[in-house]
Amino acid sequence: GRRQRGVGAAACLVRSAMAGAATGALQRGLSGAATLPREVVAVVCPDNHPALEALPRSLAEFVVGSDVASLDPKLLPLARALVVLPFSPACVASAGELLRGGHAPRIEWVHCYTAGVDSLSSFIAGPLREANLPLTNGRSAFSSSLAEYALHAALHFTKKVPRCQANRAAKVWDRFRMPVLRGQTMGLLGYGDIAKHTARLAKAFGMRVIALRRNAVKEDKDGLLDMTLGPYAGPILPAHKAALLRESDVVVCALPGTPETKHFMSTDEFGAMKPGAIFVSLGRGSAVDEAALVTALGAHGHLGGAALDVFEVEPLPPSSPLWDLPDSKLLLTAHNADLTADYFELGWQVWASNYEAFRRSEPWVTLVDTAAGY
């Protein structure tokens, strides 16, 4: 009993720390508003989008529109920052038109509301590069909820939830041995903000945590990793992947969507995983070869289960064979693992932390490496 309460307390402390970090940036921005002038900020966003309801209007003078024509022509030339909510291709195209057309000549900084910037690839390669502007993103805003999803998925299959549900439906008293996460190994593909939050929660459950990184020399500043795998220089090789996959009981893929991560997990990779291992995908759907995963989860497959929140095509087409996999093998959610009640507030809090840095000429909080794509 003491062990269970200790794990719960540790998890609560982690969540409490995450919540404090998330709100701190906005509080600092609010406190600084009285001493620093309010800037004009252009926001390109679909009309009536719910993100606009959480707009922190006390921090700046926002000029909001879905295209250049709908942005206030008197205020737009005064804007020094641009926020793009890339929820539609039209808005991304409008952001490019805004920069290229000279409609906002004072823009010094662009922020992508979401953590993933793959939907902005044409904007980054064209108008942003031509204007030579820094780009920040919503990294860290949604990491806490996604980490919870990863652990939920690990528990779902480890604790045999589908079996328990089937037993209840059939009125079967099945007193099977209940597995635990403690002592198992979680393998993280990539070690960005989502993976770090996931590692903290995994540690609270007593798991061993290893990670595959593009640069294995990077320091583990938080001391959460038991082992780091990957190249010291050059690309990630199949041998690096296989080394992590062979050791992991739970594999969490939180990779960004880039050309380098396309089908990062495919036939060979799923084949390298342990029999009964669990696979969790919550970064970008393009990183997973869904056809290969269906085979690995099928009647002759060896994986214990998979949890998917992101897909190669969204919404997932009715024709996808993923829909036909049994509940015992697949937990499927509609890219809403991070769509929490405070989703939009969290997104604006990350923007506010960068906005404060911008006004104070301090280093960016979530600067994007546009060459790497994240």
Image: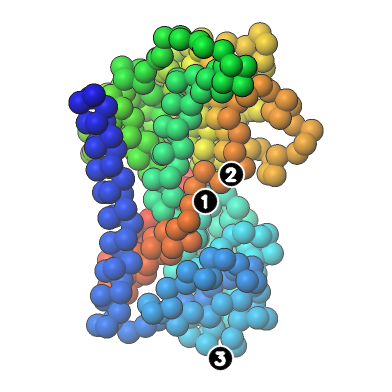
Q: Quadrant of residue 229?
A: top left
Residue 268 visible: no
- Say which mark, if any, is on residue 272: none
Quarter occupied by the N terminus: top left
Q: Residues within 10 Å of mark 1 (few under 14, many from 20)?
A: few
Q: Residue at x 24, y 37 (%)?
A: 9
Q: Residue at x 73, y 25 (%)?
A: 324
Q: Nearer the viewer, mark 3 or mark 2?
A: 2
Residue 26, given in percent of the width and then of the height, sits at 33, 67
Residue 3 visible: yes
Q: Residue at x 41, y 39 (%)?
A: 147
- Say which mark, if any, is on residue 339: 1
Of 202 and 108, which appears nearest the observer? Answer: 202
The residue that label 3 is drawn on is: 74
Q: Residue at x 68, y 23 (%)?
A: 325
The residue that label 2 is drawn on is: 335
